[in-house]
Image (cartoon, helix red, strand yellow):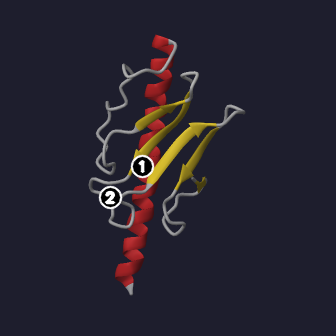
Amino acid sequence: MAVPQYQNYVSKAQATHVMSELKDVRILIELCLMEKSELSNDCEVDAIKYNLLADKPEMVVDDDNIFSYVIGTLGGSAASTLRGNTLARGCASNGVWVWKTNVDRNYRPAGCSDN
């Protein structure tokens, strides 16, 4: 009985940790925007070691090259219940940073909505 509860705890803790890592990416994106006035492939978001992500986070820009989201795909040493799922942090039209995810509701950090 205790093992499944512990696995749920680990999955939720890891998803919350990835949220924290993606918050750090926001700082890198904002620095790049200040230095270059736009996002481009020159913007590096791999300055941090992401041990719970499958690869470095992906920056998504719209057709006008305006930042939309940074997306992290869980993999690496993430729990098997999380692998392949994504967490995305983006800026809504009102300027507020929002979270979207397809992580199961049992492991989803507070404040995330469906993709």
Tell me which numbered mark, 1 or 2, is placed earlier along the sequence: 1
Of residues 21 and 98, which is closer to you in this image? 98
Of residues 100 and 31, which is closer to you in this image? 100
| Image location (x, y in percent) of residue 75 | 32, 54
| Image location (x, y in percent) of residue 86 | 45, 52
Looking at the picture, does residue 28 appear above or below residue 79?
above
Determine the image quadrant of residue 68.
top right
Looking at the picture, does residue 29 appear above or below residue 15?
above
Label 2: few (<14), some (14–19) or many (≥20) C-alpha neighbours in 10 Å: some
Residue name at image x 32 percent, y 58 percent: 78
- Evaluate if marks 1 and 2 touch, with contact meaning CB atoms under 8 Å apart: yes
Identity, as a three-letter code, of the amino acid under mark 1:
Val
In three-dimensional space, the C-alpha distance between marks 1 and 2, rounded to whole angstroms, equals 9 Å
Determine the image quadrant of residue 44.
top left
Identity, as a three-letter code, of the amino acid under mark 2:
Ala
Position of residue 17 in the picture relative to residue 79 (left or right) = right
Secondary structure of the residue carrying tag 1 is: helix
Residue name at image x 61 percent, y 43 percent: 98
Looking at the picture, does residue 2 appear above or below residue 9?
below
Residue name at image x 34 percent, y 80 percent: 3
Q: Which mark is residue 78?
A: 2
For disc 1, the marked residue is 18
Work out which quarter of the rendered image holds the N terminus and state it. Answer: bottom left
Determine the image quadrant of residue 55.
top left
Secondary structure of the residue carrying tag 2 is: loop
Label 1: few (<14), some (14–19) or many (≥20) C-alpha neighbours in 10 Å: many
| Image location (x, y in percent) of residue 81 | 38, 67
Residue name at image x 47 percent, y 26 percent: 29
Looking at the picture, does residue 36 appear above or below residue 74?
above
Q: Residue furthest front?
A: 63
| Image location (x, y in percent) of residue 20 | 45, 45
